[in-house]
Amino acid sequence: MRVAPGGASRPHRHEALEGIVVLEGELVDSDGTVFRAGDCVAYQAGSAHHTASPGGCTMLVWTNGAITAAEADDAPQDLAGARSSVNWHEADFSLYPSLPANGDPIYWADVACQNSDTGEGFYVVQFPPGAASALHEHMGNEEFTILQGELIDPDGAVYRSGDCVSLEPGTKHFSRSPNGCVTVACISAPLRTIHTRKKKAA
């Protein structure tokens, strides 16, 4: 989404989780918080607010449900309980939860994970060079964007920085990154690990 300089949204309410990533420029929330390039921001279901961009901005936007109109008075001055954010350039990455015992190490920075056992939610994922995910199936939609580096799917598709990818429910795959990458993902339903990939003997 590209917001022209001086552009602003009307007051609105999120009926489900929404995630955004600011790619360029600045976005100002209704409580005065300023989000800049690299900020990954999540709004919980039921949150109401409005945004503006005095200088213009470009951002990625995901939503898992309807966005409805709200009255200006419904947008609280304090969004701390309904909003969370991480700047992926400065994030403290930790080992991704629920990795298979013999899986490659993959790291994450939680923005708004709804269930760490099933992978549902909105978060940043870091693949070290040579790492690959376990073979898994998506029970719902998955959308992700490559923020840095390259990611390769088993059909040979190569996703590079700036690519936005959508995987339908029922998709089975694993991904690998020969040189490392950083992605941001919005997972709407559980991931089911099918089996772990065996590493080749040295």
Image (cartoon, rainbow, N blue to C red):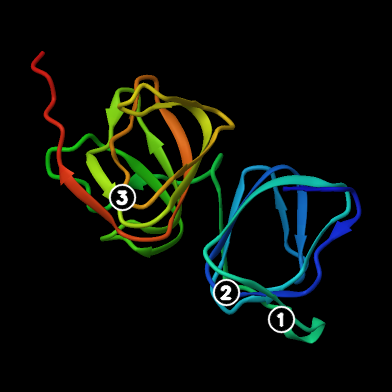
Look at label 1 and name its amino acid: Pro
Viewer-side residue, 62 vs 125: 62
Quarter of the C terminus within the rendering: top left
Earlier in the chain: of badge 3 and badge 1, it is 1
**Neighbour tally class for label 2: few under 14, some 14-19, many 20 plus, Cα within 10 Å:** some
Q: Secondary structure at mark 2?
A: loop
Q: Is disc 1 in contact with disc 2, using a CB cutoff of under 8 Å?
A: yes
Residue 133 drawn at (x, y percent): 27, 37
Q: CA distance from mark 3 to mark 1?
A: 39 Å
Look at label 2 and name its amino acid: Ala
Q: Is residue 46 left or right of residue 68?
A: left
Q: Give the farthest residue toward the left.
A: 201
The numbered dot on residue 76 is 1
Q: Is residue 37 left or right of residue 160?
A: right
The numbered dot on residue 82 is 2
Q: Secondary structure at mark 1?
A: loop
**Neighbour tally class for label 1: few under 14, some 14-19, many 20 plus, Cα within 10 Å:** some
Q: Secondary structure at mark 3?
A: loop
160 versus 41 height, above or below:
above
